Each structure stands twice: as structure tokens, then as C-alpha cells.
């Protein structure tokens, strides 16, 4: 029976509540929390995923922006005693401040801010694992390998710092109300060897965005445009980075972009 204390779903906050038990279990299984783990959950909504996480983890820190859902959630988990509900915009929460340095992350995230949430949660301290339910098209871009049709700036910028896997596809009918798109579960595991140091991650992301803005151009033209260099200087930079001047950005790996950034910075410093 419907719970009459529940507010109606708010479109503005991307509220599509997951009701399919199999999909919920796929997310919890992919995160695989143990009784020693602290889990941060982004957007607990009505608590469908929170239920599973709180049964498996030591503690769940659930961050929910909807002020009408927060009292409902606090009430629902009072007896369980291991769920803290924080009423905030997740993008304004320093995850390290609320969870410490050792935590996992899960979320059926609002689709209107998926990318900002992904990058926000990749700021150190990074979760040991993060599992998200996102739009299927976004999931495919996140995990795409170099050279594939969906490989782009999002793929490079995520894969530069994390190992990304598509865990399961979730149909629109698994939600109430159903969204207009298909969804998928992705798992991100931070790399022990990110391709660039944290101090230059911002520059790396900008370079990658700019390069994919010119995705149909060859790298010689891309470097000339982005770094304001002549042909010879651009070829020198590409040679230093061991990149063929005639390939297109969509064939370069995160490691290639990291070498390119270092080579461009080398030229700028001289
Ligand atoms: N986890 C629930 C489920 O699976 O049924 C709800 C998922 S719903 C797609 C997204 C949730 O994120 C909603 O509860 C929404 O209110 C919340 N939300 C939206 N924007 C948010 C933000 N900026 N910070 C925290 N939560 C947010």
C-alpha cells in the first residue's frame, strides 16, 4: 500500500525511484560493502537502496537534498541506528569531512547533475569503490575504450583516475515514475596510478575537453589550436609525447593525453 507520508516525486530533483529488487541488489552487490564499511549514499530518495546498504554496511551516510524526504528517512531508519541522513546538496558536501578517508560510495543519482557528481566524488579523499546508477548512454561513454564511437572527454577524464566497468543495464520500467531513458549500473575503482598528479588534474580535464571539441581534426591541428603553436613546434610537442600528428583525439588513451599535457607544459615553461 502507498505510504501516505511520502511527498509526490519531484521532477526538478530528478526523482525516479528504483522499485525493482533485482536492480537494487545488483547495485548493492557491485558495491559489496562489509560490516566494517562506511557507505556514503547520494540521493537516498525513499530509501530503497538505503535499506540494502544499511543491512550490509556498518554505517550509511545518506545525503538528500529534498527537505520533505529527510524527516521521512530519519524516521524510517531511527530504529536501525546506523543511518545518518544529511540534508544538503551533495555538490556542497566535502565527502571526506562526513565520511573520513576510508569509505564506499553509492547512488542512483539525479541525471541532471550526473557528471558534476562523478567528478565531485573523484576529488580526494576518493571512495575505495563507487557504484552509480546513471543514464545508460552516460554509462556507455564512461566505460568506452579509445577509438570507439562513444569514447570522449568523459571517458578520458574518468578513466584517467579510475577503472570503470558497466555492471548491468536497467530498464525504465524498474523505476516509479519511469524515466524517458534506459539506465545502467557503473562501478568506478580509483586507480593506484592516476595518469596525472592531482595538482594538474584541472589542466588535464581542460586539455581533454578542448581536444574533443576538435575531435574530427588531426592532432597536429589540435595542438596548434590549443597551445597556439606553429607547425614545427606542434610536431615537436607531439614527438616528445610520442603521438602521431595525424591521428585524431578519439584514438588517444588517458596516458597519451597525460604525456601530451606534460609536453605542452614543457614548451610553455621554456
Ligand atoms: N536512491 C533513490 C532510489 O533509488 O529510489 C532515489 C533516486 S532519484 C533518481 C535521485 C535522488 O537524489 C532523489 O531523492 C533526489 O531528491 C536526490 N537529489 C537530487 N539532487 C540532489 C543533490 N544535489 N544532492 C543530494 N541529493 C539530490
Image (spheres, grey):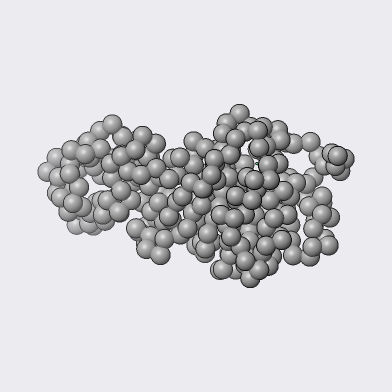
Please determine whether, in this image, residue 66 is positioned above or below residue 102: above
Q: Is residue 165 left or right of residue 242?
A: right
Instruction: Please indicate whether residue 19 sits to the left or right of residue 242 in the image.
Output: right
- For this view, does 106 lie left or right of residue 158? right
Depth check: give the residue in front, 114 or 143: 143
Residue 255: which quarter of the image? Answer: bottom left
Residue occupying the point 62% across, 66% down: 34
Residue 97 appears in the rendering: no
Most extreme residue toward the top, as rendered?
A: 180
- Quadrant position of the C terminus in the picture: bottom left
Residue drawn at x 37%, y 63% is 193
With respect to residue 162, does 220 lie above or below? above
What percent of the width, then of the height, locates residue 187?
A: 51, 52
Which quadrant would the N terminus be assigned to in this image? Answer: top right
> Residue 249, how many percent across, how many down?
28, 40
Residue at x 32%, y 43% (from the top left corner): 146
Q: Is 228 located above or below residue 73 in the figure?
A: above
Seen from the viewer's position, the closer of residues 238 and 137 is 137
- What residue is shown at x 60% (from left), y 68% (from top)? 100
As drawn, the residue found furthest toward the left would be 232
Can you give x and y, in whole percent of width and height, for residue 221 in the image?
Answer: 21, 36
Q: Position of residue 179 (x, y in %)?
A: 63, 32
Q: Nearer the viewer, residue 174 or 239?
A: 174
Amino acid at each position: 500500500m502507498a505510504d501516505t507520508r511520502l511527498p509526490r516525486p519531484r521532477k526538478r530533483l530528478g526523482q525516479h525511484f528504483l522499485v525493482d529488487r533485482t536492480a537494487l541488489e545488483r547495485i548493492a552487490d557491485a558495491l559489496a560493502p562489509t560490516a566494517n564499511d562506511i557507505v556514503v549514499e547520494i540521493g537516498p530518495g525513499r530509501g530503497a537502496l538505503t535499506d540494502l546498504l544499511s543491512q550490509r554496511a556498518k554505517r550509511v551516510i545518506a545525503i538528500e537534498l529534498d527537505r520533505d524526504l529527510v524527516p521521512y528517512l530519519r524516521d524510517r531508519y531511527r530504529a536501525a541506528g546506523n543511518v545518518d541522513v544529511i540534508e544538503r546538496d551533495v555538490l556542497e558536501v566535502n565527502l571526506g569531512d562526513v565520511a573520513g578517508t576510508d569509505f564506499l560510495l553509492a547512488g542512483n543519482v539525479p541525471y541532471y547533475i550526473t557528471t558534476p557528481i562523478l567528478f565531485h566524488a573523484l576529488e580526494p579523499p576518493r571512495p575505495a569503490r563507487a557504484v552509480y546508477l546513471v543514464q545508460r548512454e552516460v554509462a556507455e561513454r564512461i566505460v568506452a575504450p579509445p577509438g570507439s564511437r562513444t569514447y570522449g572527454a568523459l571517458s578520458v577524464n574518468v578513466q584517467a583516475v579510475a577503472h570503470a566497468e558497466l555492471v548491468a543495464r536497467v530498464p525504465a520500467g524498474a523505476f516509479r515514475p519511469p524515466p524517458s531513458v534506459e539506465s545502467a549500473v557503473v562501478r568506478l575503482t580509483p586507480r593506484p596510478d592516476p595518469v596525472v598528479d592531482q595538482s594538474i588534474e584541472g589542466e588535464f580535464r581542460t586539455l581533454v575537453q578542448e581536444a574533443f571539441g576538435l575531435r574530427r581534426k588531426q592532432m597536429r591541428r589540435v595542438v596548434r589550436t590549443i597551445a597556439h603553436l606553429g607547425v614545427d613546434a606542434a610536431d615537436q610537442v607531439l614527438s616528445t609525447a610520442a603521438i602521431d600528428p595525424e591521428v585524431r583525439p578519439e584514438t588517444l588513451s588517458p596516458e597519451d593525453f597525460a604525456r601530451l599535457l606534460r609536453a605542452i607544459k614543457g614548451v610553455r615553461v621554456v
